[in-house]
Image (cartoon, helix red, strand yellow):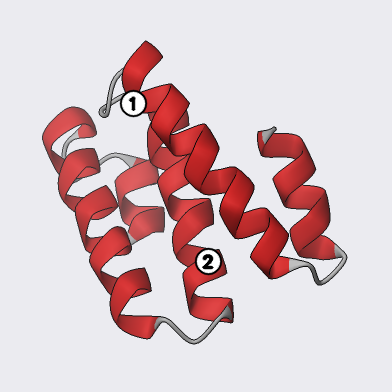
């Protein structure tokens, strides 16, 4: 589902991608938890879709949540945390 969402996004179907990423996020939170790196990646992907649909406040909120979780889980010096910044 995540890979299909990425392909849809690259084809310009951001709305379709957003729906799939929302579904993936729900499944990942339930199965592997909200702090798992794959869950955080999905959140970043969803934030991209929100930005592309001009939901800038939603995108910023999602990115801030991801950054906060990466700081907690990985630390402020981790390369993934720096990428998120």
Q: Quadrant of residue 77?
A: top left
Looking at this view, is 1 or 82 the one in front?
1
Could you tell me residue 15's position as x and y percent? Answer: 66, 67
Is residue 60 positioned above or below 73 on the image? below
Look at the numbered disc 1 and give the secondary structure of its residue: helix
Residue 32 visible to the viewer: no
Is residue 70 positioned above or below 35 on the image? below
Q: Determine which residue is flagged by label 2.
A: 48
Give the label, 1 or 2, closer to the camera: 1
Look at the numbered disc 2 and give the secondary structure of its residue: helix
Name of the residue lying farthest toward the left: 72
Looking at this view, is 75 or 70 the one in front?
70
Is residue 41 positioned above or below 1 on the image? below
Q: Quadrant of residue 37?
A: top left
Could you tell me residue 81's position as x and y percent? Answer: 30, 47
Residue 29 bears which disc, if any? Answer: 1
Residue 4 visible to the viewer: yes
Identify the residue shown where x is 73% and y is 49%: 6
Badge 2 crowding class, 10 Å Cα cut-off, few under 14, some 14 to 19, many 20 or more, is many
Q: Which quadrant is the C terminus positioned in? A: bottom left
User: In the displayed structure, does residue 75 sit left or right of residue 14?
Assistant: left
Sequence-first tag of 1 and 2: 1
Looking at this view, is 70 or 27 the one in front?
27
């Amino acid at each position: 589902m995540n890979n299909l969402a990425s392909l849809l996004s690259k084809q310009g179907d951001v709305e379709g991608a957003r729906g799939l990423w929302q579904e993936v996020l729900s499944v990942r939170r339930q199965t592997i938890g909200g702090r798992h790196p794959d869950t955080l990646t999905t959140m970043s992907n969803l934030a991209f879709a929100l930005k592309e649909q001009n939901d800038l406040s939603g995108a910023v909120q999602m990115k801030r949540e991801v950054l906060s979780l990466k700081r907690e889980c990985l630390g402020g010096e981790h390369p993934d945390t720096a990428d998120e910044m």
